[in-house]
Amino acid sequence: MMSITSKKENVVTDYHGTKVKDPYRWLEDMQSPEVQQWTDEQNNRTQQYLGNISYREKVKKEITEWTNFEKVTVPEKIGDYYYFHQNDGLQNQPVLSRSTSLDLENPEVIVDPNSLHEEGAAAITSMAFSKDHGYLAYAISYNGSDWQEIKIKDLETKKDFPEVINWCRFTNIAWNKESSGFYYSRYPDPNTVPENEASYHNQVYFHQLGTAQEEDQLVYEDRDRKELAFSPIVVEDYLILKATDGTEPKSRIYYRSLNSDDSFIPLISDGEDNYDFIANDGETFYMHTNYQAPKGKIIAIDINNPEKENWKDVVPENDDTISFIRYIDQKFIIVYLHHAYHIVKTFDKNGSFLKTIDLPTFVSVTDIKGNQKGEDILISYHSFLHPDQIVQYNYQNDRLDSIVDPEDYAKSNQFETKQIFYSSKDGTKIPMYITYKKGIELNGDNPLLLFGYGGYNISMTPSFSPANMMWMDNGGIYAVANLRGGSEYGEEWHLAGTLEKKQNVFDDFISAAEWLIEHKYTNPKKLSIMGRSNGGLLVGACINQRPDLFGAALCMVPVTDALRFHLFTAGRFWINEFGNAEENKEHFDFMYKYSPLHNVNPNAEYPPTLITTGDHDDRVVPLHATKFAAALQEHDPKNPILLRVDKNAGHGLGKPTEKWIEEQTDLFTFLFKELNVSI
């Protein structure tokens, strides 16, 4: 296809004595008319290329058909009602509804975010019910932004209160006991601070129901540690704050008596390990922690004797990693990661093992809910082959009863998933899932899509995707490698893929590709790779290091400028994961070696590559995608290097179904064409 050349400027930055060129820095200003024109030209070029592929509409039709089934989240019993999110199939956003019984028939709509934005780009991103069940505080994000605004609804009249709370980002909401208001966290109005300070100075406020935000009471701030962010929790007679710095799994815990103006008491203040409050029994606080337990454990802390030597292990660390915990009816329900899939075990409040709940293999548990007094819990789980199912588990008869099961839509019996373990470059054993249509011939000539992430302590457990089902239904193989950097095997596995060890992640991914080729699943011309965000960095680094290994690449909302990411929006949260090249020479040395933007090889033949971003992405800002696309396009590549910029879209949070289908259609149409697959 026709090559494209972008303007270059003579911009050079000195990093600890090394002069680094940055000719496309002008693309960082997304508000510039010149950049917007450049972006439009790139988008038009991409859409023209994809629009000329004859079977694009067939791909879209099949993805739409796979997507069109009813989706329901786990119902939560609040007062007399079960509340749940529901999508009838192709609605842009799920609707918050309620029902008086678990049959969920004829539900009553409580919040329909589809009515809040004409393009369906308003999403519910957080919510909490008042203690008396009469009110709902819910956060809405628009156009995929991480910024949230909080609204309050009277659940009897179903009318919203007049006040709206702004400048929130990743906040939770904690109602007081009297249901007269709630605690939340927020950042300063961005118009009142320099641009590079907008993600600092997080504060906790109390909002009194029926008053303007300007009247909210400041509850806590830490002026000495502007980088800390806070999550308020209300439990019985205590207000608890969890403080974190970025995405690193380390935290501090403070508390004070509820509804008092007393100073907060630092329960855990060293910030060396992670602590998540689970529940309390009077003055005994139960915590999930990785302190002296990389795979996690539950401890009990007597707040009157809070020294570490007085802590008690309730559920000790074991061979599997704790994914998350629910405390229901004085029982700990622990979801463990066992070789990158979930198993569920229950314990009494003293830590005695009760039983393992018998779920299928290779599933991800997405949520568990239940009454604090009751013998039943509700569990939702999905797999690569089946969307979310909801079951009711009864302790007395040890039985699972189906509540929601979209079996007719998944056709799961046509496909199969297997798990293998392969050796990475340094000999580390890495698990990998491979899913495909039954009866496929391993002749080394199958189109294969390999997905990876490898970072931020996030595990790639089985997940259901209608687009992946379409891919496999047309003969494709889908593989997911569980790379280091995630939490599949605890904090040590995470740390083995961070900072100076980040190259391990790329080695793991490249070794997965080599294993799939060696074992006749595919060949380099039919092997494609995909990654999002940190996974986009993974794809960018791997096509730089081994362009010969891949037939196509999908580099989605990527981090590509490892030297400057910390200067924009949420980037400063990632320093603990990647490093800071500007302030630390050792960090610069290893970051510069893999940074996708700075390691484009002008002599390499890159695989066909589609790079995506959203023009409203305020997490990984578009400059990463635009600069990388320009750098790859610079050397008149033989294969297409395309940039797709989604308008009025962000990092992916709350993406409308219609936009998601369009995006997936473009991605898979690109793969079918570049891998030379008939459809």
Image (cartoon, helix red, strand yellow):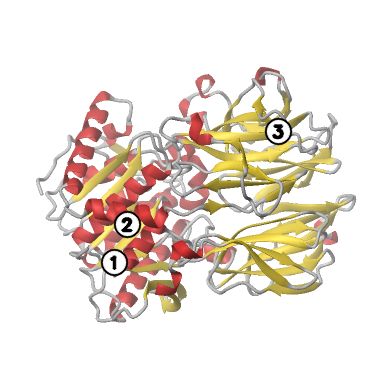
Instruction: List x then y, in percent, for residue 641.
Output: 20, 50
Disc 1/disc 3 C-alpha distance (Å): 47 Å
Dividing the picture into quadrants, the one containing residue 388 is bottom right
Label 2 or label 3, whichever comes before in sequence order:
2
Q: Residue furthest front?
A: 106
Instruction: List x then y, in percent, for residue 186.
Output: 62, 31
CB-based contact (under 8 Å), mark 2 and mark 3: no
Instruction: List x then y, in percent, for residue 601.
Output: 20, 55
Residue at left offset 41%, top offset 78%: 423
Residue at left offset 44%, top offset 78%: 420
CB-based contact (under 8 Å), mark 1 and mark 2: yes
Residue position for label 1: 474
Residue position for label 2: 62
Dividing the picture into quadrants, the one containing residue 134 is top right
Is disc 3 surrounded by few (<14), some (14 to 19) or many (20+) residues within 10 Å? some
Residue position for label 3: 155
Instruction: List x then y, in percent, for residue 274.
Output: 66, 54
Residue 33 vs 592, above or below: the answer is above
The type of residue carrying mark 2 is Glu
The type of residue carrying mark 1 is Asn
The type of residue carrying mark 3 is Leu
Residue 560 appears in the picture as rendered:
no
Residue 620 vs 554, above or below: the answer is above
Is disc 2 surrounded by few (<14), some (14 to 19) or many (20+) residues within 10 Å? some
Disc 2/disc 3 C-alpha distance (Å): 39 Å
Label 1 or label 2, whichever comes before in sequence order:
2
Numbered disc 2: secondary structure: helix
Residue 509 appears in the picture as rendered:
yes
Q: Position of 530 compared to 388: left or right?
A: left
- The residue lying toward the viewer, choosing from 646 and 523, is 646
Q: Position of 633 compared to 433: left or right?
A: left
Label 1 or label 3, whichever comes before in sequence order:
3
